[in-house]
Image: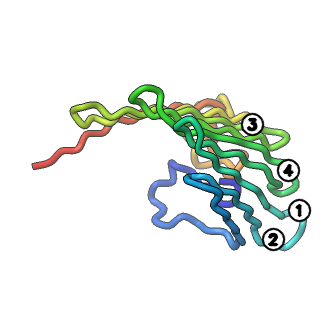
């Protein structure tokens, strides 16, 4: 989110911070839209504005992003759909001097076991694996996590009495 970046490891924060912004969205069809958003700023150096196009084709949702984030041209895209019975998602963003990309897959077994895996590449990240990096990095839309490579795995199962 180029307007409101947050760290997914900051799980004790009850509310996500917001942005003063103007957003206009026009729905062009089922699951398709064009959106323009501009964030309030006190100078052109702090200006953030973007256009997002969402499309639904071939049983996949696609998004294309173009804008300016604090003097940096920003281009990106993403998708969400299925490969067989598994969910398959990804997104990427280029910020002029940096690049970030994610890939994720998830699967729900017939026995209700949910499996999820994800990978994040952050060109601004460090290869130093010190856990203290989680608390000492400058979070931004172009630097979502302190590490160059991050892997997430998750398994969950609903227990009922």
For the residues labelled 3 and 2, the Cα–Cα distance comes to 24 Å
Residue sticking out furthest to the front: 29
Sequence order check: which comes first, mark 1 or mark 4?
Answer: 1
Image point (70%, 60%), residue name:
35
Is 13 placed left or right of 37 in the picture? left
For the residues labelled 2 and 1, the Cα–Cα distance comes to 8 Å
Q: Nearer the viewer, residue 121 or 136?
A: 121
Proximity of marks 4 and 2: CB atoms separated by less than 8 Å: no
- Residue density around tag 1, few if under 14, some if 14–19, many if 20 or more, within 10 Å: few
Q: Secondary structure at mark 4?
A: strand
Q: Position of residue 158 (x, y in %)?
A: 23, 44
Is 132 placed left or right of 86 in the picture? right
- Residue matched to label 4: 72
Sequence order check: which comes first, mark 4 or mark 2?
Answer: 2
- Residue matched to label 3: 99
Q: Secondary structure at mark 1?
A: helix
Image point (48%, 62%), residue name:
13
Q: Nearer the viewer, residue 83 or 5?
A: 83
Q: Secondary structure at mark 3?
A: strand
Sequence order check: which comes first, mark 3 or mark 2?
Answer: 2
What's the mark number on residue 45? 1
Is 58 placed left or right of 48 in the picture? left
- Residue matched to label 2: 41
Sequence order check: which comes first, mark 1 or mark 3?
Answer: 1
């Amino acid at each position: 989110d180029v307007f409101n970046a947050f760290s997914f490891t900051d799980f004790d924060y009850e509310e996500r911070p917001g942005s003063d912004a103007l957003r206009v969205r026009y729905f062009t069809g089922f699951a398709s839209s064009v959106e323009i958003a501009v964030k309030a700023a006190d100078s052109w150096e702090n200006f953030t504005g973007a256009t997002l196009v969402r499309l639904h084709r071939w049983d996949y949702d696609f998004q294309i992003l173009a804008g300016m984030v604090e003097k940096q041209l920003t281009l990106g895209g993403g998708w969400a759909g299925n490969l067989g019975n598994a969910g398959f998602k990804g997104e990427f963003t280029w910020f002029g001097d940096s690049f970030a990309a994610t890939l994720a897959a998830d699967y729900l077994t017939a026995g209700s076991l949910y499996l999820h895996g994800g990978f994040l590449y952050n060109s601004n990240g460090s290869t130093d694996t010190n856990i203290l990096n989680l608390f000492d990095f400058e979070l931004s839309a172009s630097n979502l996590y302190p590490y160059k490579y991050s892997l997430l795995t998750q398994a969950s199962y609903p227990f009922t009495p």
